[in-house]
Image: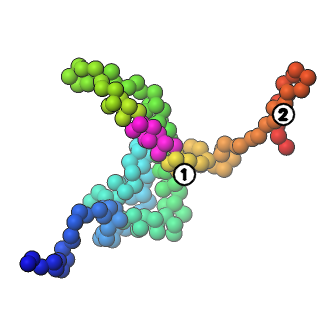
Amino acid sequence: MPSSKVPAGKAVGPDYSLPALTKKAKVRITPQLMHYISDEMAIGRNLLDILGEPDMPSYAGVMQAVAAHEELYKIYRHGRVRQAEYLADRATKLASDPLPTHDSQGRPMDTRWLNAEMQRRKLELETIRWTMTKLSPNGIRDRQEDKPQHQAMTISWAGGEVEVRAAE
């Protein structure tokens, strides 16, 4: 009967760890490095993917540095705001791009595939929408005064006339 013991240091089953969350060598987080991270986020890259590159700091290290240093926070925040702008453009393109009519061999697209593509796009758009509200609730300048204001209005119909006024 085979032994069920696992040799020390050997994992059993698939590895689901995220590269950016695993233990990494200490990397000094400088403003120049944070600018690189910010610029990569601004072109739509995921922070976990960026930090998964060789010679990059850990996710926890970046979060600690951002929390502890105002200058690094401002650089990071600027990258997140620009990432939200990128995602807005991506969402617009995704929603406005027509579905393909023919596959690479020139055959008409299968309706099941088209339906699956529509569902994929809907999911991606919902994810982008949710992410954008978290990344940049105050707009591109990231200022509270630029935040969209929720205003209520009252519409009434009296005597055949419509009246619209701001709610109090």
Q: What residue type is labelled 1?
A: Lys
Q: Which of marks 1 and 2 is nearer the N terminus?
A: 1
Indicate which disc residue 91 carries. Answer: none
Name the residue located 84 percent from the left edge and 24 percent from the top edge: 162
Report crowding for label 2: few under 14, some 14 to 19, many 20 or more residues within 10 A (C-alpha). few
User: In this rendering, does residue 32 appear at all?
Assistant: no
26 lies above or below 78: below
Spot occupied by residue 129 in the image (x, y as percentages of width and height): 52, 43
Question: Front-most of 133 and 99?
Answer: 99
Q: Quadrant of the C terminus?
A: top right
As drawn, 22 above or below 53:
below
Q: Looking at the picture, how far across and down is residue 156, in whole percent?
A: 84, 30
The quadrant holding residue 44 is: top left
**Colour setup of the view:** rainbow
* Residue farthest front in this picture: 1
Segment tinted magenta in the rendering:
119-129
Dot label at residue 165: 2
Residue indicated by mark 1? 134
Describe the element under mark 1 as helix, strand or loop.
helix
Q: What residue type is labelled 2?
A: Arg
Q: Is residue 150 above or below residue 30?
A: above
In the displayed image of the protein, which residue is found farthest to the right? 159
